[in-house]
Image (cartoon, rainbow, N blue to C red):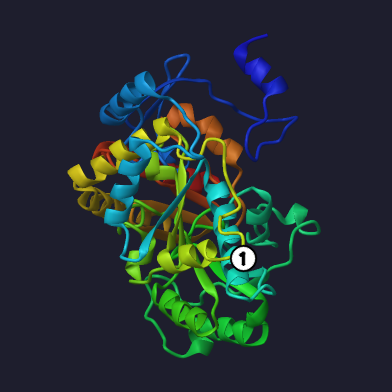
């Protein structure tokens, strides 16, 4: 049995048919923006391996930091113990985050970071004497991970977890913000969509612990970009109703949208922030849930006194060392210019798809490029074409999209956009 035959027979892949997995590529090596198959075929990783390898694969500074840490201490429990990589990463994060977000809880995946945030919100509300506040509000089109509570705040109709809707907690879903990122903002709540949030909080606010959403950019829920001003209105309404505001920046944090954090487009600071993916430059899994002093103090002064969560690999030293090195790269390189150049080039080159039959929309924000089709795209077609185009794309739903590493060259990016336009042309 060949390795690929064994894989097809025994290994499960994410969101892939378990009996008929379709085309599969055996990757033997990665470097920079490139994936190399076992047969030597090379493909540009236009997905940044699910949006995390912002500095490219096997970045020498991150690899060096991990190797040094591996030689000293790969792991140690975080209960009752601490270590320099966790402390140093915390220093870096607090320095780059808005003032007020300074209480950091490390975990080992984005979904777990969301679970921790939801727990924080409920524990905080209980500590404030509002024990009836156990429900959550969110907006349609969102995605917050695959673990149990995280699934309950993903879009229940068009999201990836509708299958489990009968088993999940019932949450409160609002319409998507009505005004897109590049449109003019309208102050009328009936036209910008904030009226729905206002009505929900007035009628159900006494049951709601927090509003959770992806600021400005909805990722896996459809690559939808909405106006930052909606967040400013949501912040004011949450404050008025004692509802916490949670931002999920697992996909957008660390420069992807053109700002260091997507919330920076709005100048809004949440009560709880979730980070992951690019935190380590995609070299090892790590996530963080960051809360304000108010939230931390509320939990600390409660009867329990502790946040009831404790992952085995919390603050793993190897991952924290990678995180420090990754954040150092953001401070050393002009990532903002890199992302702006990527956006400018994608805006120009993806515009060729606008007049293709079957194309519904073309949009770019930061280092995110999207060709939205009128009908669902068969991802297996892109997988089959990848060795010929030399570009690895993984469309989902109606979206052909890319999130390339920030270090991608103009010529490499042109190959990516050409592959996207060609796929859009043949997707109907």
- Is 179 in front, or is 106? 106
- Is 256 in front, or is 397? 256
175 over 402 or under it: above or below:
below
Residue name at image x 26 percent, y 37 percent: 411
In x, y percent, where is residue 192? 48, 83
Residue name at image x 54 percent, y 33 percent: 383
Figure quadrant of residue 186: bottom left
Quadrant in which the N terminus is drawn: top right
- Evaluate whether residue 137 shows in this view: no
Q: Which class describes the residues within 10 Å of circle 1: few (<14), some (14-19), or many (20+)?
A: many
In x, y percent, where is residue 52? 42, 41
Task: Report the side of 152 relative to 106 (left or right).
Answer: right
- Evaluate whether residue 171 shows in this view: yes
In x, y percent, where is residue 100? 35, 66
Q: How many marks?
A: 1
- Is 273 in front, or is 7? 273
Residue name at image x 38 percent, y 69 percent: 269
250 over 66 or under it: above or below:
below
401 over 203 or under it: above or below:
above
Query: Which residue does the numbered mark 1 point to in the structure image?
Result: 122
Q: In the displayed orientation, state which residue is furthest to the right.
A: 166
In x, y percent, where is residue 24? 58, 26
Q: Secondary structure at mark 1?
A: helix
């Amino acid at each position: 049995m060949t390795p690929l035959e064994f894989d097809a027979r025994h290994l499960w892949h994410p969101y892939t048919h378990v009996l008929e997995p379709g085309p599969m590529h055996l990757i033997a090596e990665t470097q920079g923006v490139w994936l190399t198959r076992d047969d030597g075929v090379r493909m540009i990783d236009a997905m940044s391996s699910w949006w995390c390898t912002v500095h490219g694969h096997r970045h020498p500074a991150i690899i060096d930091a991990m190797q040094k840490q591996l030689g000293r201490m790969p792991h140690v429990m975080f209960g009752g113990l601490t270590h320099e990589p966790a402390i140093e990463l915390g220093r870096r994060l607090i320095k780059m985050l808005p003032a007020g977000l300074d209480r950091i809880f490390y975990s080992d995946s984005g979904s777990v970071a969301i679970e921790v945030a939801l727990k924080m919100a409920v524990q905080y509300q209980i500590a404030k004497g509002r024990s009836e506040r156990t429900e959550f509000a969110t907006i349609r089109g969102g995605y917050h991970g695959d673990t149990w509570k995280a699934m309950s705040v993903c879009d229940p109709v068009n999201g990836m977890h509708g299958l489990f809707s009968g088993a999940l907690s019932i949450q409160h879903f609002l319409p998507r913000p009505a005004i897109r990122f590049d449109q003019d903002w309208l102050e009328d709540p009936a036209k910008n969509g904030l009226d729905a949030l206002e009505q929900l909080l007035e009628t159900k606010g006494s049951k709601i612990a927090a509003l959770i959403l992806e600021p400005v950019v909805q990722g896996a829920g459809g690559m939808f970009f909405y106006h930052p001003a909606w967040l400013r209105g949501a912040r004011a309404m949450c404050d008025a109703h004692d509802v916490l505001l949670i931002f999920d920046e697992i996909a957008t944090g660390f420069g992807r949208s053109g700002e260091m954090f997507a919330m920076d487009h709005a100048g809004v600071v949440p009560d709880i922030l979730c980070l992951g993916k690019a935190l380590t430059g995609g070299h090892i899994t790590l996530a963080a849930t960051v809360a304000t002093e108010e939230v931390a103090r509320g939990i600390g002064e409660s009867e329990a006194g502790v946040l009831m969560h404790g992952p085995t690999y919390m603050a793993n030293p190897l991952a924290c060392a990678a995180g420090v090195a990754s954040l150092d790269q953001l401070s050393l390189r002009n990532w903002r210019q890199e992302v702006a150049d990527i956006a400018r080039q994608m805006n120009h080159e993806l515009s060729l798809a606008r007049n293709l039959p079957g194309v519904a929309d073309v949009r770019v924000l930061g280092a995110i490029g999207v060709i939205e089709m009128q009908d669902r795209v068969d991802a297996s077609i892109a997988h089959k074409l990848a060795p010929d185009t030399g570009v690895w794309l993984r469309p989902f739903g109606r979206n052909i999209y890319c999130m390339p590493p920030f270090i991608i060259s103009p010529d490499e990016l042109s190959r990516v956009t050409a592959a996207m336009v060609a796929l859009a042309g043949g997707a109907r």
